[in-house]
Image (tube, rainbow, N blue to C red):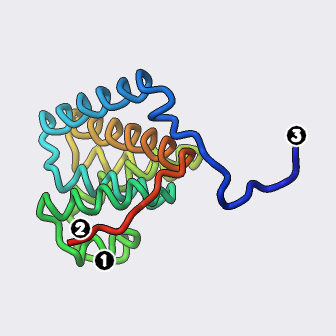
Amino acid sequence: MSDTAPTPNHRRVFVDKQSPKAYHALVQTSEAVRATAADAGLDRVLVELINLRVSQINGCAFCLDVHTRAALRAGESTQRLGTLAAWRDTELFTQRERAALALAEATTVPADGTAQESAYVTARRFLSDDEISAVIWVAITINAFNRVSILSKHPVRAVTA
């Protein structure tokens, strides 16, 4: 094993392109999760907030780019998007959204058992069983997409108007 760091032009394998059947299965899972979320009553804005918060935690630039634009299309405000990383320190998010965001964070960083238990207790107060399940599945799915994009180093390109 080499201790040499890769050069900046070190080519990464785009695992989604290299293994299209596996990636297609992940896309199908995502589509099923989106339907599950809608059936549970989670609106598109809340789903995108979950996608964005998980992507912030994971540091996935590609997914942050994709889901910021999706959240804006769904009607989310730039103020809330700009403060999402510090959602606990604002009054911009409802109790239901806070419960979903905390549960998504606990799903993303499951090693913190205390935070996970606290998030689950809060979720129980503001979310139905179907909503809890949907939030967890949305977080699981975006975590998977984050890993695909981070490890593939998917580029983020400027959007031209």
Image-quadrant location for residue 32 = top left
Q: Residues within 10 Å of mark 2 (few under 14, many from 20)?
A: some
Give me the residue at 74% from left, 54% from top: 6
Give me the residue at 17% from left, 32% from top: 35
The kind of secondary structure element at disc 2 is: loop
Disc 1 versus disc 3: nearer the observer: 3
Where in the figure is residue 69, as x and y percent of width and height? 24, 61
The numbered mark, 2 or 3, whose residue comes first in the sequence reads 3
The kind of secondary structure element at disc 3 is: loop
The numbered mark, 1 or 3, whose residue comes first in the sequence reads 3
For label 3, the residue is 1
Image-quadrant location for residue 96 = bottom left
| Mark-to-mark CA distance, 2 and 3 | 48 Å
Where in the figure is residue 123, as x and y percent of width and height? 30, 47
Q: Amino acid at mark 3?
A: Met
Q: Quadrant of the C terminus?
A: bottom left
Where in the figure is residue 126, as x and y percent of width and height? 22, 50
Q: Residues within 10 Å of mark 1 (few under 14, many from 20)?
A: few
Question: Quick check: 71 left or right of 26?
Answer: left
For label 1, the residue is 90
Q: Amino acid at mark 1?
A: Thr
For label 2, the residue is 93
Badge 2 vs badge 1, beta-carbon distance below 8 Å = yes
Of the pair 45 and 149, the residue shown nearer to us: 149
